[in-house]
Amino acid sequence: MSRAQLTSTVEQNTGGAVAPFLAGKNKIINGDFRINQRNFTSATSGYCFDRWTIAASGGTMTVTPQTFTAGAAPVAGYEAQTYAQIVTSGYGSAGDYGLFIQNIEDARTFAGQTVTISFWAKAASGTPKIAVETYLGIGAGGSGGTTSTPAGAVTISTSWARYSVTFAVPSLSGATVGTSSTIAVNLWVSAGSTFNTRASSIGTQNNTFSIWGVQAENGSVATPFTTASGTVQGELALCQRYYWQCDLSSVSLIYGAGFSSSAAAFVTYLPVTMRTTPSASSSGTFTANENGVGTRTFTALGAFGLRTTALSFEMSGSSGLTVGKPLEANSGVIAISAEL
Amino acid sequence: MPSIYLEITDGLGQQAIQRTDENGTVWWIPTDPANSDYQAYLATLAANSAPTAQ
């Protein structure tokens, strides 16, 4: 190794003179919780912040987005906007659990590597623990591999502080990686004794946890936090590979045309190519502006045509449309999901 | 109440699955083996919950 290489390595490992703000080093997407396409305000299951999901049983685990007071973010020089607050309640039985999870695409990520997972955290009271684990999803048609890799637990306090765990992720030697494989980063905030091995015996906990700046990277040192992309737009695009929510009244202009007196068809490109062919749903009130006529109200939005790069849909249940006449969709919400 | 699945034809004339969730949300799911919603549907099928053909 040359002196220059050595110096670079030392600086990277120590967070020294040249801060290693490398795009892509952090495999956690939306680790600063800035992207919230679902506009959730409180969630107890499923997806909440982009890329983050909740798994809970026995007790209640409530995640809410919280805003940092300007100047109060835990890292000097990084004026973060949002953190995740997790309130756990009703936990006490052996089989209870509460996890905050990010599924990272591809089981090969981190395989056979030393990995460091870091985050800032604080509690409302006491000194509860947060356990870290990676969990392999070998994918459809796949087999083998070590499913759970416990990485240990950290004891947090009532003040913001950064915590990290370093551990070895097993290799995939002998395994067959299937379709849509994953490796999840699991942050356990409560775990009954049934999960002592996976959750490093943290036990059931009822408290309020605040978490920000989650980073998962190769190597044995927690380097300075950066988002996966290093930019706001880049992070949004990374999130939109898995989920896109389109509010027709404000987010996107989508044009179509009537194909009967009661229905119209629309098509649009997606902002980024999705991970795989996405699922789609709609909600809200569906209207479109018919050229030269005005607002038309529809009773349904569906009949999706789904591709990784584009989307078609129909609005139906209107009346008096002119076949072939252009319409601009202007209300309704479409959700497109290619989550893992 | 579990989700209800229905085999349908999508807007492009291809086979798809329609899932109605407990909260009433309707999802259109492509028959793409890499789509996790479709994987969940296949798992439901494997558990002998046959779909209703449209």
Image: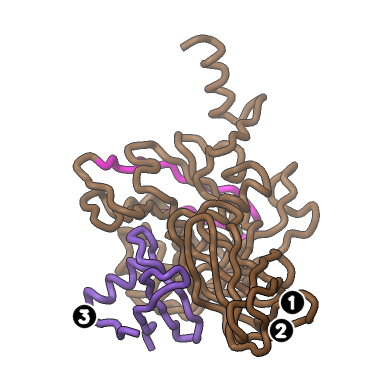
- Corner quadrant of residue A40: bottom right
Q: Is residue A34 above or below residue A145?
A: below
Give the residue pinned by disc 1: A289
Distance from label 3 to label 2 (Cα)? 43 Å
For the point 54% across and 10% down, the residue is: A3
For the point 38% across and 51% down, the residue is: A183
User: Which comes before the other along the chain, label 1 or label 2?
Assistant: 1
Three-letter residue code for mark 1: Asn
Give the residue pinned by disc 2: A296
Region in magenta: A153-172
Q: Secondary structure at mark 2?
A: strand
Does the magenta run of residues contain B47? no
Which chain is disc 3 placed on?
B
Is there a contact, CB below 8 Å, between mark 1 and mark 2? yes
| Chain A visual colour | brown
State which mark lies toward you, 3 or 1. 1
Q: Secondary structure at mark 1?
A: strand
State which mark lies toward you, 3 or 2. 2
| Chain B visual colour | purple
- Corner quadrant of residue A310: bottom right
Residue A308 percent location from the top left of the image: 48, 56
Q: Residue A305: which numbered mark, if any?
A: none
Three-letter residue code for mark 2: Arg
Residue A176 or residue A206, whichever sits in front: A176
